[in-house]
Structure formats: C-alpha cells, structure tokens
Image: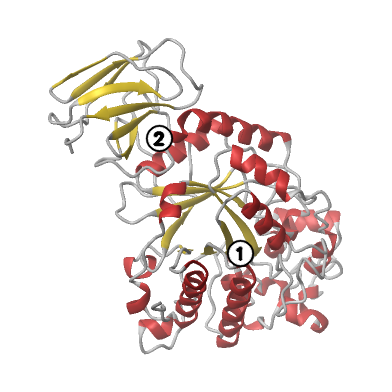
Amino acid sequence: MEKFTGSFTSLLQYQCPEWFRNAKFGIWSHWGPQSVPMAGDWYARSMYIQGTPQYHYHLRHYGHPSRFGYKDICMLWKAEKFDPDGLMDLYVKAGARYFVGQAMHHDHFFNYPSRLNRFNSVAVGPYKDIVGMWKAAAEKHGLPFGLTEHLGATFSWWGVNKWCDHSGPYAGVPYEGNDPAYRDFYLDNIEHVPQDRANTKARPWYTSNTKFHDYWLAVMKEVIDLYQPDLLYSDGALPFGEREVADTEDAKFACGLEAVAYLYNKSAEKHGKNQAVYNQKDYRPEIYRIGVLDIEKSQLARISEDPWQTDTCIGNWFYDARLEYKKPEHIIEMLVDIVSKNGNMLLNILQKPDGTIDDETRFILEEMASWFSVCGEGIYGTRPWRKFGEGDSRVVIDGFKEAKVQWNSSDFRFTAKDSTIYAFMLGMPENHAVVIKSLAKEEQVTSVHLLGGAKLPFHQAFGILTVQLPETMPTKYTNCLAIEIKKGNS
C-alpha cells in the first residue's frame, strides 16, 4: 500500500471518496464551553475585550474577567442531559448522511481525554468523552464520523486574555489570562496581545511560533489516533501558511501537510485505501486539491469539477438565545443550490449547554425529515448535470452573508443520476405549468414524475419541456421533477 507523504506532490494525488460525494448532507455539532453563557460565538475571546456585548454580559453575569475567567466558564459546562443516540436518531431522520463533531474550538478546550491538554471534557466540566460518545452514536447509526479542529488560530486569537480594562473601576487590572498557574491553558502568547484596541474586529489567525506549530501537529496526531475520523476539518487555511521563513511551499505548510498525510495513511491502514476527507478554506487549487474545499457560510457561483462543502448554521455558531434561526425552506433551498454545483452542506445544529436542543431546532429537523422523505432521491448519490440551473435568480456570493433568495417560477436547480435529470422547482408557477428550457433537442424525454407523487403529462418541442403540475404538491417546500431521458442521449 503506497503511503502519502507530507508534500504537495504526494497529496495532490488525493481522490475524494465516493461516500462523501454521495452523502450531500451532514450535520455538525459546534458545541463546547462557549455554549454555557448562551451568548454566541467567540465568547472566550470577546469576554476579554472591554466594550463588546459579551464582555458586558460576562461582567454583569459572572463578574470581572480578572476574577472569573474563561477557565471558570469551562468548569460550568456539565452537558448533563447529553443524549448522543437520541440526537443522532433525529439527525438521520432529518437527512444527515454524515456527522461531524467538534474536537476543540479556538478556546483551547478539548472535547476528548487529551494527554496534551489538561483542560479537556473528561478532566474538567462534563467529565465525559464528548467526541467518543458522538463517534459511538454515529457508528451505531451507520454514519461516517468527522471532527473539526479550530486550534490553529488559538495562539493569536486568544492574545486578548492578557489585556486589562482601559477604563472604569478595573482599569489596569490584568485579566486572569495572565495567571502563571494557568499559562499552559491561556498560552505563552504575550507576543500576540493586540496593541490597537480600536481594531478589535480584526480576525487574528495563524502564528509563526514554531513551538505552537509542533503542539498543533501533536494534537492532530493524537485525535486521529484516538478516533480515526472519516473527515477532519481545519477552521481556516491549511496550517501554517503564514510562516515567515520557508524555502519551499512544502516547508511553509509542513505541519499541515504532515497532518493531512497522517490522516489519509491511518484511513488507508483501516480500510485498505484512503476513505478520509480533509477540509480547509484556501481557494487556491494547489491547496484545496489535497482534500476538499470548505466554504464557511457561502458557496460557489457555478459547478465545480471538484467536490466541495459549505458549512453553515441554523443560527449562530454557538448557542445564542438572542438570534433568530433560519427557516426550513431557506435551509432546503440552500442545500438544493449547493448540491446542483457539486457541493455538500454541513449544517450546525445548536445545542444548549446541557446538551439538549430547543423546540425551534427540533421543528427544523422534523420539517427537513419530511422534505427528505419526498425529495431525497434527487439529492443522495446524484452528480451535477451539465448545467446547475436556469432562471432569473442567483444566490449572492458575498462573504459570510446568506440572505434568502426571492425565487420565482423561472428558477430551477438540476442534479442527475444515470438517465434521470432532477429538476428542483424553487418557485411555483401560479398556473401550475412548468417550463424548462435547458434540455438539448436530442435529449428525448420519455417520462416525467413528481417525487412523492405520480407521473405527469408533458410536452417536448425544440428542447422546451412543458409539464403540468397537480393542484396539490407533495411538500410545502421545494418540489422536484424526475425527468427520464431516453438512454443513449447525453
């Protein structure tokens, strides 16, 4: 068995496994101690930035961060009602064909029993192997199991825990991230304390600190050895591309390349050939083709030859009691558009600190289960057709924005499987007469049926396909036509 090496030459031979290409939809648990305040994402950073909403929440709810710091938040996380089997059953019914847990976020708290970090979920807080429990539940339900790591950014992201207030009654009092007794947790990152406090929204990311690089790589090997994930996701580009001194690209990305090769080789040892997927967020083909490109809360504008993934969430990344959730129809429309372009959707389902989900979340899952029971045939195991869609409307590709599109009756998204073209109708015509203009003249339609319904009358002339829909549709969300093409037509 030929092994991958930690070089671009070797890793560019990577082939995406069929399970990932067929799955199309996964569910993610982006969950950890930062869920405790129920105040949203990046809490472990923003609680140390005076003037932010999370700082004010922390000050007034827990006390000043010189006295009650993030380590104390970690001790409050109990996950006392965590039921991974029950949740996984819901997720499978809701359409998930792979599951991804969070190994650690930027907060440097690990959701598994690490030998390298004493702040982990078995030694502090829940006293549970969260990752191990998720993996057992995923395997019980027959789902490929993945993990996300957000550690690469931690060293610089968390420099603010060395700050102090610049005004008010605690001005000049150091936050407890300066406590030498917890320096292993809060890190020796004094060099990354931002000096410009007016620029607190700047996104801190990778560091050139080679000691931290070595630590990151050791952690990646530890989590791969313990859980042999089918998918590993880095929240950012391949580590550590911002390294200042490197003679070659292989040297510049040495840690990341070694970790990816380690993941693939461990998978090959288990399965006879590599079945693992590595996700990262660098769009450059010489980077993303060593794995599968991930796009956070956005997507591609057209079909990609290479499989890719959107990761998104129903609300905020961590549980946030203040924010509205996406509606089921919005999530379904996003999924259809993504799959038509050769992508997968990884959807974060929010959990409260006790491990439960709320009623709104359960409703979303139940609505998706109902929709997949009707239209899943047009999603699972499909491939892009020769064009992803037709119509007037497009998703706006603009950073982390995911506004719901106002679709109309001209808008379709296509997938394909064998001799079937699936046409998802994103807008319903008032007269229930569908007109599809994208078929070539030589593509002879032999039948059309409505997924979840019956065969429908149709007429085809000069490549234009007209289909008469029934008055009552199988689902109140996006419906789908299965268009059979005479074999031998392309």
Q: In which quarter of the image is residue 151?
A: bottom right
Q: What element carries label 2?
A: helix
> From what the image shows, is residue 293 above or below residue 429?
below
Mark before the other along the chain sequence, 2 or 1 = 1
| Residue at image point 62% right, 67% down | 227
Marking on residue 476:
none
Taking depth in this image into account, of 273 and 77 the one nearest to the observer is 273
Q: Position of residue 404 (x, y in %)?
A: 47, 35
> From what the image shows, is residue 132 above or below residue 393?
below
Q: Can residue 327 be seen in this view?
A: no
Q: Position of residue 190 (x, y in %)?
A: 67, 82
For discs 2 and 1, the disc positioned in front in the rendered view: 2
Q: Quadrant of residue 209?
A: bottom right
| Residue at image point 40% right, 49% down | 343
Is mark 2 in CB contact (under 8 Å) with mark 1? Answer: no
> From what the image shows, is residue 89 above or below residue 206?
above
On screen, residue 46 versus residue 451, left or right, reads right
Taking depth in this image into account, of 219 and 162 the one nearest to the observer is 219
Q: Is mark 1 on a helix, strand or loop?
A: loop
Marking on residue 378:
2
Q: Position of residue 84 (x, y in %)?
A: 72, 50
C-alpha distance separating marks 2 and 1: 45 Å
On screen, residue 199 versus residue 275, left or right, reads right
| Residue at image point 55% right, 39% down | 95
Q: Residue tagged by mark 1?
A: 200
Q: Where is residue 301 in the image (x, y as percent from the top left)?
A: 33, 46
| Residue at image point 36% right, 17% down | 429
Mark 2, Cα crowd under 10 Å, few <14 / some 14-19 / many 20+, is many
On screen, residue 34 versus residue 393, left or right, reads right
> From what the image shows, is residue 398 above or below residue 146?
above
On screen, residue 366 versus residue 438, left or right, reads right
